[in-house]
Image (cartoon, rainbow, N blue to C red):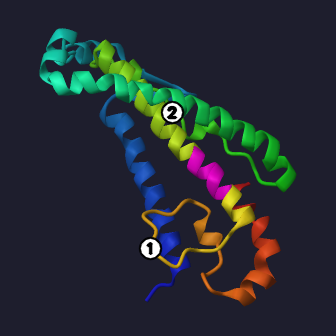
Amino acid sequence: MPNMQEIIEQIKSLEKRLSIEFQKKQEEFFYKINGKKVRFDKATKEYHKTFITKVRTYLYRAGFLKIITAPFVWFCIIPAFFLDLVVMAFQIICFPVYKIPKVSRSDYIVIDRHSLKYLNVIEKINCVYCGYFNGLMGFVREVGGRAEQHWCPIKHARKVGSIHSRYNKFLAYGDADSFKKDLERIKQDFDDLD
């Protein structure tokens, strides 16, 4: 039976394989990535335009309840911007002091779907929102995970819904000997990020 570290390594390996499978879609759907830009050939762009749903049709299909909840959804962007600023400040001010490697926002906040030609203007704006908001949550989680590794690298006793990228470095719950012996080493164990 594999131990926790072996399972985590298997998960990482599967994530890498999944990333490779995503990259294979470039060939299937005729696009290339140059830096941060995604480029389709001209014929594919023209083909995509044939799938655009008119805004009026899109709104009609959305229905009344979805339309009236939209302001609440969009209001959430205000605390998200504030969270973004606070976490950026936290990382800029605290991480150098604690010798924790900084997290690159651009690795998490990816906004590229708005350039798909088969999306109407509302769908494009929604894609920007989702790319920013969900990317921000991933960024915040990584910043939090690195800070947690420095301050409290102990696994939980109870089941956790999902674990962040640093959790595998944490000490077992209840292992007081390892806590005293290995805490200082674990606080600075970011070699895997280089």
Question: Which secondary structure lies at badge 2?
Answer: loop
- Residue 27 in the image: state x and y as whole percent: 36, 35
Indicate whether 77 appears above or below 140: above
Mark 1 crowdedness (10 Å alpha carbons): few <14, some 14-19, many ≥20? few
In this picture, which residue range is highlighted in magenta? 140-146
Relative to residue 97, is residue 64 drawn left or right?
Answer: left
Indicate whether 10 appears above or below 20: below
Of residues 16 and 180, the one nearer the viewer is 180
Going by the numbered disc 1, the residue's amino acid type is: Lys
145 within the magenta span: yes
Q: Quickly name the residue at label 1.
A: 159
Looking at the image, can residue 40 be seen?
no
In primary-sequence order, the first of circles 1 and 2 is: 2
68 within the magenta span: no
Of residues 8 and 80, the one nearer the viewer is 80
Mark 2 crowdedness (10 Å alpha carbons): few <14, some 14-19, many ≥20? some
Residue 110: assigned label: 2
Q: Contact, CB < 8 Å: mark 1 with mark 2?
A: no
Which mark is nearer the camera, 1 or 2? 1
Relative to residue 133, is residue 169 drawn left or right?
Answer: right
Quadrant location of residue 151?
bottom right
Of residues 23 and 74, the one nearer the viewer is 74
Residue at 18 percent across and 27 percent down: it is: 65
Question: Dividing the image into 4 quarters, which one contains the C terminus?
Answer: bottom right
Going by the numbered disc 2, the residue's amino acid type is: Val
C-alpha span from label 1 to label 2: 30 Å
Quadrant location of residue 140?
top right
- Residue 48 in the image: state x and y as whole percent: 25, 18
Magenta: main secondary structure: helix
| Outermost right residue | 97
